[in-house]
Amino acid sequence: MKIERVAVYVVRHASGVVNTRYVNSDTMASDLETSIVRIDTDSGLTGWGETCTAPSYYLPTLASGARAAIGHVAPLLVGEDPRSPNRILHAVNTAMRGQNPAKSALEMALRDLHGKIHGVPLVDLWGGRIAEDLPVMCLVEEGPVDRMLAETAEYRAQGYRLYQMKIGEGSVDEEVERIAAIMADRQPGEQFWFDPNRGWTIDTAMEILPRVAHLAPFIEQPCETYRECLAVARRCGIGLMLDEVMSDQDCLIRAAEDGILRVAVLKMSCTGGLTPHRQMAELAGKFGIPCRIEDFYGTGLTFAAAAHLAHSLPPATTYALYDYIDDRYPVVNNPLAVVNGRVSLPKDCGPGLGCDVNEAFLGVPLSEY
């Protein structure tokens, strides 16, 4: 069996500017682009993967750069035996340093193909499922408090219990009032966390957090760098959910040993794929730190990959998954269903990722190798 072709498609997501301290205009295109990889074999089997890179003002990534990197190493895949994905991935890692979004998409496609070759779901290639179902978080965009509470109520009615609340654009007093009002709305069994998207300076964080500490809020990466987050956490005595700085095992170990990490947010395009993602999740589990297992964004392919990985881990290791399903972008015909704020892999989910890809929606590949 040989790999005959690698093809790359693009799905563009309409999106607004994500708040960070460095965003001062939206004059450059801000729509997200998902790069989808298709790997074809001479046996007729196909593997699918994807990566959705963060905007260039948010992280040092470009969607066009990820696609260029895929094209750069595609010759290392064509003609190779897909039954040896580790050997192929080793060749890719040897030939190209960094470029984690590209590596993530390629590995997802190779693992999907590997599962199909053996006729088993991806979760079974990792030794089978441990978790039976897992919590899914929902995202509430920043806005007037009344609107945020109304949106929360809509999610609550659907069964969600984990809420990521976007904040960061208001004054110190406005942020304190927003956090207090939302925490007052909290119901038993629910968790809210507040995400300024690294928009606060140390000074701003140290003004806000002591004023809300008695509410025991959950704060996601308030500042740009790990050094800044460390200073805030130590000064205010508040553990953090760390996101963009969780790029490798060294970062995770440092944060765990510093004692400031409550939850690690692992994004595949940052960690470099399912294998390093799983390694970091297992390491976090040894520290007793739960993880959000996800990517910056994506479609049903990424949701399926995260679900397969998370179901093969002890339930306590997974804090939450993120639901990327959007009817505007029907890349997958059979996306996993979120029921009462939780997702479960069907027993008959199919081999590999178990995704029936909507090739008609994808259209013609942007590039082929």
Image (tube, rainbow, N blue to C red):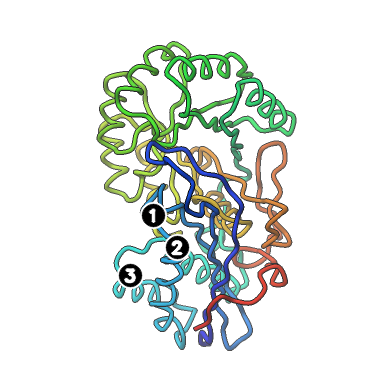
Q: Amino acid at mark 2?
A: Ser
Quarter of the image for residue 69 reads bottom left
Quarter of the image for residue 220 reads top left
**What's the distance in space between the residues labelled 1 and 2, CA to CA?**
8 Å
* Disc number for residue 104: 2
The image position of residue 146, as x and y in percent, is: 65, 20
**What's the distance in space between the residues labelled 2 and 3, CA to CA?**
11 Å
**If you read the primary sequence from the N terminus, does the residue marked by circle 2 or circle 3 appear first?**
3
Mark 1 touching mark 2, by CB under 8 A?
Answer: yes
11 versus 31 height, above or below: below
Does the image show residue 285?
no
344 versus 116 height, above or below: above
The image position of residue 50, as x and y in percent, is: 53, 63
- Residue hosting label 1: 271
Mark 3 touching mark 1, by CB under 8 A?
Answer: no
**If you read the primary sequence from the N terminus, does the residue marked by circle 3 or circle 1 appear first?**
3
On screen, residue 368 versus residue 98, left or right, reads: right
- Residue hosting label 3: 93
**If you read the primary sequence from the N terminus, does the residue marked by circle 1 or circle 2 appear first?**
2
Q: Residues within 10 Å of mark 3 (few under 14, many from 20)?
A: some
Does dot 1 land on a helix, a strand or a loop? helix
Q: Residue at x 68, y 67 (%)?
A: 357
Does dot 2 land on a helix, a strand or a loop? helix
Q: Amino acid at mark 3?
A: Asn
Q: Residue at x 57, y 81 (%)?
A: 40
Q: Amino acid at mark 1?
A: Thr
